[in-house]
Image: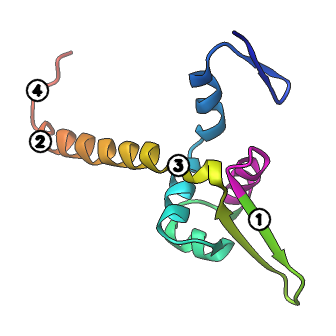
Amino acid sequence: MEIHYKEKTFFTSKDLALSVIGGRWKIAIIWCLLQQSPLRLNEIQKILSNVNQRMLIRQLRELEEDKIITRFVYPVVPPKVEYELTEIGRLLEPVVNSVCDWGDDFRDFLEKNADAPSAD
């Protein structure tokens, strides 16, 4: 069964899911918003200190476009903008936790095998 979304065709829901949450910072952004929500841009940037603001804004816009997060703009000066997970975004919690747990396991694996000879 083909899935048409954003002028693209996906052949499985897995491909669609990876398209939506794939990206260098998307899982990390979702993780931040699972820990504390809502967050402002500068708060997310403090947590993810290695991301530049342009990339962070781009990833946030993509997540907003895909309805994973919502962006609230308050009518104040200076502008106040907050980001929060949507209901469908909150459903990513077990996925994000599993990815983070796997990352911890993989880091431990790498540390344990750092001195092991290469199989090459």
* Viewport quadrant of the N terminus: top right
What type is the residue that disc 1 sits on? Arg
| Whole-number angstrom distance, CA of label 2 to CA of label 3 | 26 Å
| Whole-number angstrom distance, CA of label 3 to CA of label 4 | 32 Å
**Disc sitting over residue 71 in the figure:** 1
What type is the residue that disc 2 sits on? Lys
Q: Nearer the viewer, residue 45 or 93?
A: 93
Mark before the other along the chain sequence, 4 or 2: 2
Mark before the other along the chain sequence, 1 or 3: 3
Point out the frontmost of discs 2 and 3. Answer: 3
What type is the residue that disc 3 sits on? Ile
Mark before the other along the chain sequence, 1 or 4: 1
Q: List the residue tagged with mark 4.
A: 117
Q: List the residue tagged with mark 2.
A: 112
Q: Residues within 10 Å of mark 2 (few under 14, many from 20)?
A: few
| Whole-number angstrom distance, CA of label 2 to CA of label 1 | 42 Å
Residue at position x 87%, y 88% in the image: 76
Q: Position of residue 12 (x, y in %)?
A: 62, 16
Image marks 4 and 2: residues in contact by CB distance under 8 Å: no
What type is the residue that disc 4 sits on? Pro
By secondary structure, the bulk of the magenta-drawn segment is best described as helix
Q: Residues within 10 Å of mark 1 (few under 14, many from 20)?
A: some
Q: List the residue tagged with mark 3.
A: 27
Q: Position of residue 52 (x, y in %)?
A: 64, 61
> What span is colored magenta in the figure?
54-69
